[in-house]
């Protein structure tokens, strides 16, 4: 659970969701999810990265929710999703499939955007039938498919075994990050953001990252250290756009270029000069614009051609019991697979509701 108070004002303050859900994954892991925007609008699914949460997408949610149905969820062990002993790329794929099964109607297709580990989640799920049934297009932001530690430039040393070893020890540290201080903000900015990042951007990212429990941070660092999803890139057959920051020290542009070259259907690689790893925060307009372009090209046109848009509100208008039953029939989650809260609530209220649901 988040340990720090979220921002309550400004462009990086998370907007209040229309609905909150607890979705159960294939192994029983419970995932916090949010739905924003009109229930019959084109859907967008957002998957955040390592040490982040749904709050990371605040700028995208605020903009897109005006005319899209935006679905965001916390990866297991992050944000309001409880920790789970199972941390693996298979679990990431299972979780994304559970979210898609519960929030999208049969045959409904969405743009799926993933940042960092969220992009790796997409790659892990790329060959799954349910992912292919629901993915109209994909946006990959600041991500990679393998050799993450070897290519990282967080440590200012020449590439080699020494840098790789030290990088793994630092990124996988169990030490608590502690409170957000001027020094911790400087360290986080150096490691994850471009030199020109505004103080409000750094503050928002620092609050999110420092709120991640150190157990989850460490457990997922081990998964990232041995990541190998190169096959997942080649299996990602839907139209896919790639965004990267030229000054990204965690996933340098070499990753984005390799992913773009290996994708079966790459529809653009955008390298943002001077930006770091946190591209959705550092250039929210660009990232939101890419998502809008993908929706216009690959979701709205499909709806107009096939009439699939009439299905957009099916999950929303069904009762919670009917929805869970339908998902259970599809084989996604057990009968107790989802609990939902309707209506906007503030941060404290949302956590109280979640705690009651877990009881």
Image (spheres, rainbow, N blue to C red):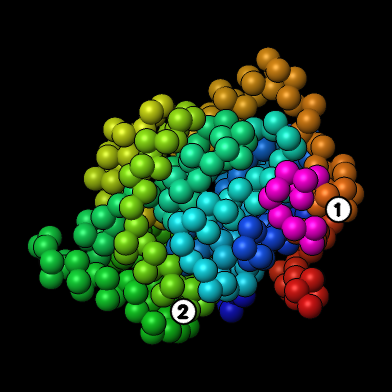
Inspect this view and state whether residue 297 appears. yes
CA distance for labels 2 and 1: 34 Å
For the point 73% across and 24% down, the residue is 308
| Quadrant in the rendering for residue 40 | top right
Relative height, residue 181 to residue 349 (above, below): below
Front one among 159 and 222: 222
Q: Do the residues bearing badges 2 and 1 touch, measured as CB atoms within 8 Å?
A: no
- Read off the magenta span: 326-336
| Quadrant in the rendering for residue 70 | top right
For the point 53% across and 32% down, the residue is 137
Q: Which quarter shows the C terminus?
A: bottom right
For the point 40% across and 42% down, the residue is 232
Q: Earlier in the sequence, mark 2 or mark 1?
A: 2
Q: Which quarter shows the N terminus?
A: bottom right
Q: Position of residue 118 (x, y in %)?
A: 48, 52
For the point 62% across and 36% down, the residue is 134
Relative height, residue 131 to residue 23 (above, below): above
Relative height, residue 155 to residue 176 (above, below): above
SS for tag 2?
A: helix
SS for tag 1?
A: helix
Q: Position of residue 60 (x, y in %)?
A: 57, 47
Front one among 165 and 57: 165
Residue receiving disc 1: 320
Residue receiving disc 2: 214
In the rendered view, does 355 fall on the left or right side of 126?
Answer: right
Taking the magenta stretch, the answer to whether it contains residue 102 is no
């Amino acid at each position: 659970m988040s340990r720090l108070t979220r921002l309550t004002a400004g462009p990086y303050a998370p907007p209040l969701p229309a609905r909150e859900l607890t979705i159960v994954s294939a192994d029983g892991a419970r995932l916090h999810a949010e739905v924003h925007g009109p229930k019959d609008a084109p859907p967008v699914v957002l998957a955040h990265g390592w040490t982040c949460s749904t709050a990371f997408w605040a700028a995208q949610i605020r903009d897109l929710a005006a005319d899209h149905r935006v679905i965001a969820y916390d990866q297991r062990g992050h944000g309001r999703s409880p920790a789970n002993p199972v941390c693996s790329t298979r679990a990431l794929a299972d979780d994304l499939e559970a979210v898609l099964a519960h929030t999208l109607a049969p045959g409904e297709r969405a743009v799926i955007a993933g940042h960092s580990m969220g992009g790796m989640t997409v790659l892990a799920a790329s060959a799954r039938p349910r992912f292919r049934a629901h993915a109209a297009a994909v946006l990959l932001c600041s991500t990679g498919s393998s050799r993450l530690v070897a290519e990282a430039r967080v440590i200012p040393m020449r590439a080699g075994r020494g840098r790789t070893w030290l990088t793994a020890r630092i990124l996988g540290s169990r030490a608590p990050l502690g409170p957000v201080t001027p020094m911790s903000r400087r360290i986080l900015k150096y490691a994850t953001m471009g030199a020109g990042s505004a103080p409000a951007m750094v503050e928002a990212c620092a609050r999110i990252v420092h709120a991640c429990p150190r157990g989850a941070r460490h457990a997922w660092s081990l998964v990232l250290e041995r990541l190998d999803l190169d096959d997942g890139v080649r299996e990602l057959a839907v139209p896919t756009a790639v965004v990267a920051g030229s000054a990204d020290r965690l996933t340098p542009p070499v990753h984005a270029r390799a992913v773009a070259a290996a994708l079966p259907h790459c529809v653009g690689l955008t390298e943002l000069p001077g930006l770091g790893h946190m591209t959705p925060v550092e250039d929210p307009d660009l990232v939101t614009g890419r998502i809008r372009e993908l929706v216009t090209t690959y979701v709205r046109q499909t709806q107009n051609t096939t009439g699939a848009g009439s299905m957009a509100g099916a999950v929303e208008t069904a009762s919670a019991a009917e929805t869970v039953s339908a998902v259970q029939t599809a084989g996604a989650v057990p009968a107790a697979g989802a609990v939902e809260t309707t209506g906007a609530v503030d941060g404290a209220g949302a956590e109280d509701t979640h705690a009651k649901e877990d009881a």
